[in-house]
Amino acid sequence: MSFQELISRLALALGIGLLLGLERGWRAREERPGGRAAGIRTFAISGLLGGVVGAIGQSLGGAGGGTAIGIGFAGYSIAMMVFCLEENRADKDFSATTWVAAMLTFTLGVYSVMGDTRLAAAVAVTATIILALRESIHDWVQNLTWPELRSALVLLAMTFIALPILPNEQIGPFSGINPREVWLIAIVLAAASFLGYAAVKYFGASHGILLAGAAGGLVSSTAVTVSNAHRAASREGSPRLLAAGVGVASAIMFIRVCAIVFVINPGLLSLVAPPLLAAAAASMIYASIAAYRHRQDKSQDQTFKFRNPFAFWSVAGFALFLGVVILIGRRVVDALGGTGAIIGAAIAGIADADAVTVAAAKLAPHPLANSEAAIAALTAVATNTISKIAIGGIIDRGRFAIKITLMALGCFIAGAAALWVTFAIVGL
């Protein structure tokens, strides 16, 4: 390691200590000098000390270097522990935060010299943010309910434990089911439901449902529809407002499909953009009217309240159903070739319009003509919209289903009119 690089790495170790020490010092700013075990100066020196120990260990190398670093860390930790214990006795407190933060500062100082400087800086910033959010985190934990904690743990386990170990290959009858693909659908459904729950809890029904619809629509408007349909069936929310959330998610989905086409095959955009944007406008108009009418009833936010972030088995079952639908759509395309593209798009679009759009955009202008690829993509979007009507009818069978149907009809009318004009202009 060159001298200049060593100096820059030691400077990073010092900067990490200053960053963590700034938060610790700010929190104890009202204390008299010397009234705390560690402040900004102690943390800054701790980071630099870790950098020096790391440099010594690197120069020694091998077992000697590792031993030097281990002895330095142990000695620093014991010394800091003694001072933190005395501070806790004086304050009659049981906090170990300062001690842990100090050990992390020393360790990051060592790693700044011996490891990836970007990772060291990122960890330091993350740790500082966590320390600075102490009150917010404590308030959040205090207000956390058991269903919320349970659902969060299940969602984390689904994402970081189950997903990595699932096989990413086609298995089962006809070698068509991909377990990881189905599980990803389940994660998206669960995340959309959890996001809606959290948004309503922290922003209220009127704003929370619409925000959750917008965020969920970036990934899957179908997931938003399933979540809101279950809420409506359980009488946990206003059917009008829940339908407005689906309207926002649908509008985002229409725009998202336009963006996919623009990135993969811009030549198709002139054919698919007018009907999709017209449908997005109709969906947003419906959502705006529904949200405005909801706000006229001041009792709605107090009357309805989400009770559970999501139900695991219903999410898993619906994800499996959507996976089977995608499988059938792919098999139809494989069996019928180009002539089955539109039929396959219609089937697969029930679950996911994005995958069909990507495939159609890549197949144009050969072997599919631009008009055929555009019709396939629009067919997938149309059946995806129809699936929202079916979801509302099957799960809710009430006012929510009726309002979703009205929203979908408005999208169909606007989109069909724009498509007719577009095809008339281009002579198709």
Image: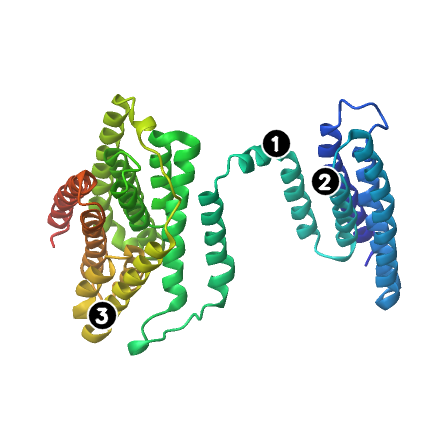
Disc 2 crowd, CA 10 A, few/some/many (<14, 14-19, 20+):
few
Please state which amino acid type lies under the numbered disc 1.
Glu
66 is higher (above) or lower (below) than 141: below
Disc 1 crowd, CA 10 A, few/some/many (<14, 14-19, 20+):
few
**Image quarter in which the C terminus is found:** bottom left
Please state which amino acid type lies under the numbered disc 2.
Thr
Asked which quadrant contains residue 139, the reply is top right
Residue 125 shown left or right of residue 222 in the figure: right
Which residue, given by chain and number where applicable, does mark 3 sit on?
333
Q: Which residue: 21% across, 73% down? A: 337
Q: How far from the left and from the top, in percent, is residue 34?
A: 86, 28
Which comes before the other along the chain, label 3 or label 2? 2
Which residue, given by chain and number where applicable, does mark 1 sit on?
135
> In front: 252, or 313?
313
**Image quarter in which the N terminus is found:** bottom right
Marks 3/2: CA distance? 59 Å
Marks 1/3: CA distance? 55 Å
In this figure, which colouring scheme has been used for the structure? rainbow
Disc 3 crowd, CA 10 A, few/some/many (<14, 14-19, 20+):
some
Q: For numbered disc 3, what is the local secondary structure?
A: helix
Which comes before the other along the chain, label 1 or label 2? 2
Judged by depth in the image, the label closer to the viewer, 3 or 2, is 2
Disc sitting over residue 120 in the figure: none
6 is higher (above) or lower (below) than 42: below
Q: How far from the left and from the top, in percent, is residue 189?
A: 36, 52
Q: For numbered disc 2, what is the local secondary structure?
A: helix
Residue 375 shown left or right of residue 252 in the figure: left
Which residue, given by chain and number where applicable, does mark 2 sit on?
97
30 is higher (above) or lower (below) than 208: above
Which comes before the other along the chain, label 1 or label 3? 1
